[in-house]
Image (tube, grey):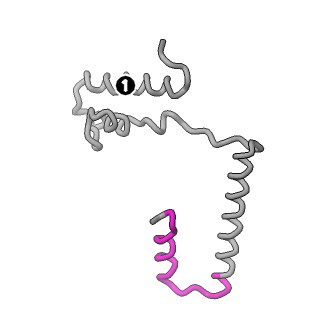
Amino acid sequence: MQREGVFREMKRRKAYEKPSERKTREKAEAVRRARKAARKQAQREGLIPMPKRLAAAAFSRTNLASCFGIFSRNSYVQSGSASPLSRSIVRAVLVVSASALAGRGST
């Protein structure tokens, strides 16, 4: 629903919007959409580089631990009640997955 703009629309409708403000907002939205489309097209054609993705952000401890079923979403690795062994397992998995994503691989 957020991608469809439902929440933004509900928030906008709470108060009256003057016609001049509405025209200005709609123009700005159209410009924003056109710029985004042009940027995406240029990226597909190779004129500008694709955005870089961070491996560390994708594999935070809580996300990685929940993926492997080691801990629940409210990971007790961060709260300190996990055993040292379980903490070292999560760290080892993080290192291996981060190096695999970076293309280095562990050989």
User: What residue is drawn where x is 46% and y is 76%?
Assistant: 10
Res 64 quadrant in image: top left
Name the spot of residue 103 as percent of width and height, x first.
55, 24
Nearer-the-camera pick, 81 or 34: 34
Q: Return the residue found at the far front.
A: 45
Name the spot of residue 59 as percent of width and height, x first.
43, 35
Residue at numbered disc 1: 91
Q: Considering the image in quadrants, where does the N terminus appear?
A: bottom left
- What kind of residue is marked 1? Arg
Q: Is residue 5 left or right of residue 65?
A: right
Query: Would you say residue 16 sits in the magenta stretch?
Result: yes
Nearer-the-camera pick, 96 or 41: 41
Tag 1 secondary structure: helix
Q: Does 26 appear above or below 49?
A: below
* Range of residues picked out in magenta: 3-22
Q: Is residue 106 left or right of residue 67?
A: right
Query: Would you say residue 82 sits in the magenta stretch?
Result: no
User: What residue is drawn where x is 70% and y is 74%?
Assistant: 27
Q: Is residue 62 left or right of residue 29?
A: left
User: What residue is drawn where x is 68% and y is 71%?
Assistant: 28
Q: Does 9 appear above or below 41?
A: below
